[in-house]
Amino acid sequence: MTTQSLLLKNARVVDPGAGRDGHFDVLIADGKIARIGKNIPAGDARVVEVPKEWVVTPGLIDIHVHLREPGQEHKETIATGTWSAVVGGFTAVACMPNTDPVNDSSSVTQFILKRAAEANFARVYPIGAVSVGQKGDQMTEMGDLSAAGCVAFTDDGHPVRTAMLMRRALEYSSMFDVPIIEHCEDPSLKGDGVAHEGAVAAMLGLRGIPSVAESIMAERDISLSEMTGGRVHIAHMSARQTLRAVREGKSRGIKVTCEVAPHHFTLTDEALRKGSGYDTNYKMNPPLREEADRLAMIDGLRDGSIDVISTDHAPHHADEKALEFDHAPFGIVGLETCVPICLDRLVHGEVLSLPRLVALLTCNPASLLKLPGGTLREGEPADITILSPDTQVTIHTADLVSKSKNSPFDGWSLKGAVAATIVGGRVLYSNPIVHGTELLRMAD
């Protein structure tokens, strides 16, 4: 794929980071954004008259992705995961450290970056572990990990085990001005729970995980953020009590941010009762919660309390998900389903404006982790996502390019699609079901 000069003519450009929402020409040359403006002369560039229904945005960024490599390549690899990201419209992802071995040393970080460079699809930003082996005992060498390329720290899959370790992590990470990303979960309350503690779990005979298992840990960490001045980011928020804690922290000027995944503002634990029940594609951690929690996540998106939408893309092999509900792993894939769900349920559902949705997927995550991109700037790499908000799509999990297919959204018909994904000026993906993308395929 070449980086041939390309002129996107008269495109609707939605770029909240630059305060831009209007029709412009976008000239791409030498892999960078050469110019954004009106009536740009084409010169030697290939001209694409952008269909009026398309929307050009900065490249989408997902700051919560599990790429599984090293050590769990039967679930996903860095190559398959970053290709899944590109097909889903994401030009950059930040990957979690719970690999095998854990990303708790600079050598693992360097391996991830090397594999990402070899794949050459979406950009990859590693996140390092807070504790060695994610065991909750000894803090990692955050300085070495930061120097190697880690953009944040987390023990995701587990909470930071003790308040003292979290305090030290927040103090130390503040030296690099990076956040601690917290999987909020009180282990003593979670126990061996597998679903939200409520009427549905009781009816199905499943051990429950109460909402306060999440919110209590969030309150601990927000208090420690206030004490230390460090930045804490609440991952995959699911409970209305947690959102209340975040709002209170923000109102006091504490450095707390949060994210929500599409499944937590779309689904509830009632989904566990579908069909014969016990479908492990509805098993994730934190679990699907009650309708009041789902509505709270919608409210948080609407009023700006929630900073980021991320997918928590968690691929698992079909054999693992085929186990009994109690024994199957938590998690679902999400990179390729995020955009249709968000456009259909949030924009067409009149929850959010399109610019607000774009901000949640571009400039907000870039700002949170201080990543390149997130907005379209002249002279910067041409990382661009093109959306087709009115294209009707049906999700078929068998067609996902991710190595794993564990998704609860199989068969869903949604309004909204990715038309194309451009990384570094290369048209890596153009969606064959979207009218007009043949123009971009000719530019590949």
Image (tube, rainbow, N blue to C red):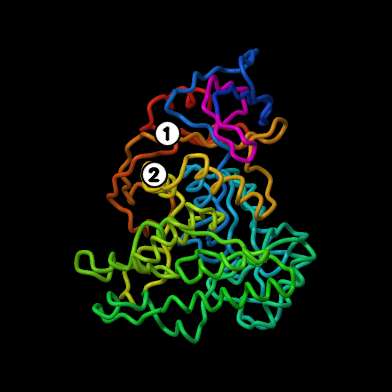
Residue 99 seen: no
Residue 150, picture quadrant: bottom right
Residue 373, picture quadrant: top right
Q: For mark 2, does the 10 Å Cα neighbourhood hold few (<14), some (14 to 19), or many (20 or more) residues? A: few
Residue 96, picture quadrant: bottom right
Q: Residue at x 63, y 76 (%)?
A: 133
Q: Is residue 316 left or right of residue 227?
A: left
Residue at which label 1 appears? 388
Q: Image height check: is 354 above or below 23?
A: below
Residue at which label 2 appears? 350
Q: Is residue 137 left or right of residue 196?
A: right
Q: Residue at x 64, y 62 (%)?
A: 127
Q: For mark 1, does the 10 Å Cα neighbourhood hold few (<14), some (14 to 19), or many (20 or more) residues? A: many
| Residue at the extreme bottom of the image, as rendered | 188
Q: Secondary structure at mark 2?
A: loop
Residue 14 lies in the magenta-colored region: yes
Q: Which residues are magenta?
A: 1-21
Q: Secondary structure at mark 1?
A: strand
- Where does the image place residue 312, in percent across and percent down from the top left? 49, 60
